[in-house]
């Protein structure tokens, strides 16, 4: 398709691409329907298993039995509370602590007692593993479909394939690294291998972030700047992907710095940055500020695209009526 055609009649170009997409989808509709049916069944089975486990545990009341045999004394419980909660005020030199319930089986103990929290978390590890495995299969299937479905053999499909591949890698880390460590209560979260796996997870996370940005730019340029879309996304898709993956490698190299560590803490069940100046700096600027900025830009571009499509649809409907 020539550049002048993009400039003179972009709506006609969009109609042609839509027709081509429908023709390509028709060739592989069986594959899409089969994949959708399979993962719908898998999601339903996963949900039923999770609900059944919850009902069974509530009926057995094994959590309350586990709490009952501990018989934690009030003084021991108070000492645990005081180690984790800051006083809400002082009367002279005497601290005022937040009010907690008197019973051992209270919600306060359920929250503050590390052993009970670990006990309850370990019960959910099979469900977490199943959810992570389902997500890996879904994303891997998405990658395959972008190569098999003719309508997705475009720049949009290729960038989506990169996004799904990175998501699959992140879910693999959650499923095969975090779940077993939580279940077996490994506490060596500051080890070298733990820090490097955290660094790898950040690399894939930045790939998903940049992929979302370029997917949004892909739609935006198609609607508002067809010539740029034609030159940048259709002719140079591979170079574009290599371009932003190289940026992700740059982000990855930042965490080789002294104290710039990121790891999964099996004690607190959180991904954490190191309590160092470098760790806190990258946590705020790269993780929080940069991540929120990219998400805001993606949201803005998508909203503008939706409004433009609604406007074009209303104008097209008015022309048909007239």
Image: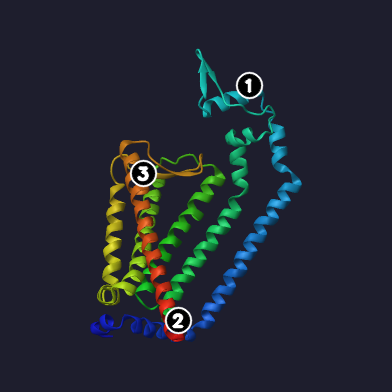
Residue found at the far front of this picture: 322
Q: CA distance from mark 3 to mark 1?
A: 38 Å
Residue 220 found in image quarter: bottom left
Q: Nearer the viewer, residue 78 or 188?
A: 78
In contact (CB < 8 Å): disc 3 and disc 1: no
Q: CA distance from mark 1 to mark 2?
A: 74 Å
Quarter of the image containing the N terminus? Answer: bottom left
Q: Residue at x 62, y 41 (%)?
A: 119
Q: Position of residue 238 (x, y in %)?
A: 29, 72
Q: CA distance from mark 3 to mark 2?
A: 49 Å
Closer to viewer: mark 3 or mark 2: 2
Residue 309 found in image quarter: bottom left
Residue found at the far right of this picture: 59
Q: Secondary structure at mark 1?
A: helix
**Number of numbered tags placed on the structure image:** 3
How dense is the environment of label 3, judged by Cα within 10 Å: few (below 14), some, or many (20 and up)? many
In contact (CB < 8 Å): disc 1 and disc 2: no
Q: Secondary structure at mark 3?
A: helix
Earlier-in-chain disc, 3 versus 2: 3
Q: Which mark is residue 75?
A: 1
Q: Which mark is residue 283?
A: 3
Q: Residue at x 69, y 41 (%)?
A: 63
Q: Residue at x 53, y 49 (%)?
A: 180
Q: Position of residue 297 (x, y in %)?
A: 35, 58
Q: Position of residue 83 (x, y in %)?
A: 52, 26
Q: Is residue 215 above or below residue 17?
A: above
> What residue sits right under mark 2 in the picture?
317
How dense is the environment of label 1, judged by Cα within 10 Å: few (below 14), some, or many (20 and up)? few
How dense is the environment of label 2, judged by Cα within 10 Å: few (below 14), some, or many (20 and up)? few
Quarter of the image containing the C terminus? Answer: bottom left
**What colour scheme does the image use?**
rainbow
| Drawn side of residue 39 relative to residue 177, left or right | right
């Amino acid at each position: 398709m020539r550049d002048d055609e993009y400039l003179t009649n972009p709506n006609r170009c969009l109609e042609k691409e839509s027709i081509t997409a429908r023709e390509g989808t028709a060739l592989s509709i069986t594959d899409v329907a089969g994949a959708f049916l399979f993962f719908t069944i898998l999601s339903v089975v996963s949900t039923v298993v999770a609900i059944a486990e919850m009902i069974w545990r509530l009926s057995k009341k094994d959590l309350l039995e586990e709490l009952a045999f501990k018989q934690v004394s009030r003084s021991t419980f108070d000492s645990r509370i005081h180690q984790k909660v800051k006083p809400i005020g002082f009367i002279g030199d005497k601290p005022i602590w937040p009010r907690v319930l008197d019973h051992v089986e209270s919600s306060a103990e359920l929250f503050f007692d590390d052993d009970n929290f670990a006990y309850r978390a370990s019960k959910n590890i099979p469900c977490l593993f199943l959810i992570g495995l389902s997500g890996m299969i879904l994303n891997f299937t998405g990658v395959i479909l972008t190569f098999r479905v003719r309508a997705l053999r475009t720049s949009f499909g290729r960038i989506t394939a990169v996004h799904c591949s990175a998501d699959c890698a992140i879910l693999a880390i959650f499923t095969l690294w975090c779940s077993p460590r939580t279940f077996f209560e490994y506490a060596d979260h500051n080890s070298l291998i733990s820090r490097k796996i955290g660094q790898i997870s950040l690399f894939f996370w930045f790939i998903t972030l940049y992929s979302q940005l370029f997917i949004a730019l892909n739609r935006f340029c198609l609607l508002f700047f067809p010539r740029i879309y034609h030159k940048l996304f259709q002719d140079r898709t591979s170079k574009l992907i290599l371009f932003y993956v190289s940026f992700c490698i740059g982000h990855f190299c930042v965490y080789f710095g002294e104290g710039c560590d990121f790891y999964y803490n099996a004690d607190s069940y959180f991904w954490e940055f190191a309590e160092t100046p470098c760790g806190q700096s990258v946590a705020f600027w790269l993780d929080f500020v940069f991540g929120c900025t990219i998400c805001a830009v993606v949201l803005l571009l998508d909203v503008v695209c939706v409004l433009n499509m609604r406007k074009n649809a209303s104008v097209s409907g008015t022309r048909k009526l007239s």
